[in-house]
Structures are given as structure tokens and as C-alpha cells.
Image: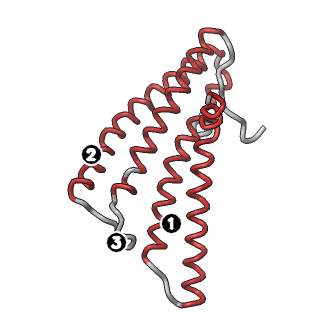
Amino acid sequence: MRSFLTTLDKNAERWALLVFYVLLVTAMAVEVIRREVFSYSSIWGEEIVRYSFIYLAWIGAAAAIKERAHIRIDVIMHYAPQRVKALLYIFGDLVMFVVAAVALYWSFQTVQVSWQYGSVSFGLRISMVYFLSAVPVGFSLIIFRLSQSLWRDIKDLRTGHPVYEGDKLFD
């Protein structure tokens, strides 16, 4: 069971991103073929692509937080000692945690209103709750990954290990 949870922790976002990306590309390819070959398109294809992209973006944000791959200006980090780096990362994660918690609260309000009034999508005729839930799901994942990052950084700060800076895109 522990190895399953470790694998899930390591790859959950990757698997979800793969599913939504394949869904997006497949629906888009089908719609292009339908439009160009059969001179016919559908509303549902566009909606699947749109909502897949929204889930892709939010899950990708959580994956970026996990790997410290989100966009940042880190010129100061190159010149700061390890302890200062750790403190700066912790501060940044705490600020992001507060922002994510506030956004999570307000995104639940939107989902609740949609649930209360029973809004549905135009093409698929599916409850908008499933699509609007992408935002609270994304912020929940972000908060979870920020908690892991804070835990890791505090542990590194206490033990004196170099802070995790993520993988380098370019060397």
C-alpha cells in the first residue's frame, strides 16, 4: 500500500495531465476532420476541448508547484546563502498558500451557486459543477503540494541540507 501511495504521489499529476491532454488532442482532431471533411462541426467537441484545457492548466499548476517549475525571478537565489534561500522559498510558499486558500474558498462559492441553480453546459448538457470544479480541484492540489514543499523546506532548513530548487531547464 505504501508503494502505491508513493507512486501516486510521484505520478498523479502526470497521469491526469496525460488523460486530459489525450482527450483534448483527440477531440480537437475529430472536430478538425469533421469540419474539413464533412463540413460539419459540433458544440460538444469544442466544449470537451475547452474544459479539458481548463483541467490541464489547473493540474499543471499543481505539478509545477511540486517540481518548483513555476515561473519565478530567481536572480537573488543565485547569490543568497542556503539558509536565506530556504527562508525565501518558505516565505514564497506561505504567501502562495494564503492566496490559494482564499481562492479555494471563493471557487467553492461558484460551484455551490452552479449546483444550487442547476446550470448545464450548452453542448454537452452536463452540469456545470463538473467543469467549474476544476478550479477548487486545482487549488486543492496546489495547497497539498505547497504543504509538501513547506514540509520539505523546513526539514532541509533544520538539518542544514541544501534547499530543493527543482530541476534546471537549462544549464
**Image coords of residue 15 (percent x, y):** 61, 48
Q: Is residue 125 left or right of residue 94?
A: left
Which amino acid type is shown beneath numbered disc 1?
Val
Q: Secondary structure under badge 1?
A: helix
Assess whether mark 1 and mark 2 are in contact (beta carbons under 8 angstroms): no
Q: Earlier in the sequence, mark 2 or mark 1?
A: 1
The numbered mark at residue 90 is none
The residue shown at (55%, 47%) is 60
Pointer 3: what residue? 122
Name the residue tied to disc 2: 109
Whole-percent x and y of residue 109? Answer: 27, 45
Q: Amino acid at mark 3?
A: Phe
Mark 2 to mark 3 CA distance (whole Å): 22 Å
- The tag earlier along the polypeptide, 3 or 1, is 1
Of the residues shown, which amino acid type is indicated by label 2?
Gln
Q: Which residue is mark 1?
A: 49
| Disc 3 from disc 1: Cα separation | 14 Å
Of the numbered discs 2 and 3, the one sitting upstream in the chain is 2
- Viewer-closest of 115 and 25: 115
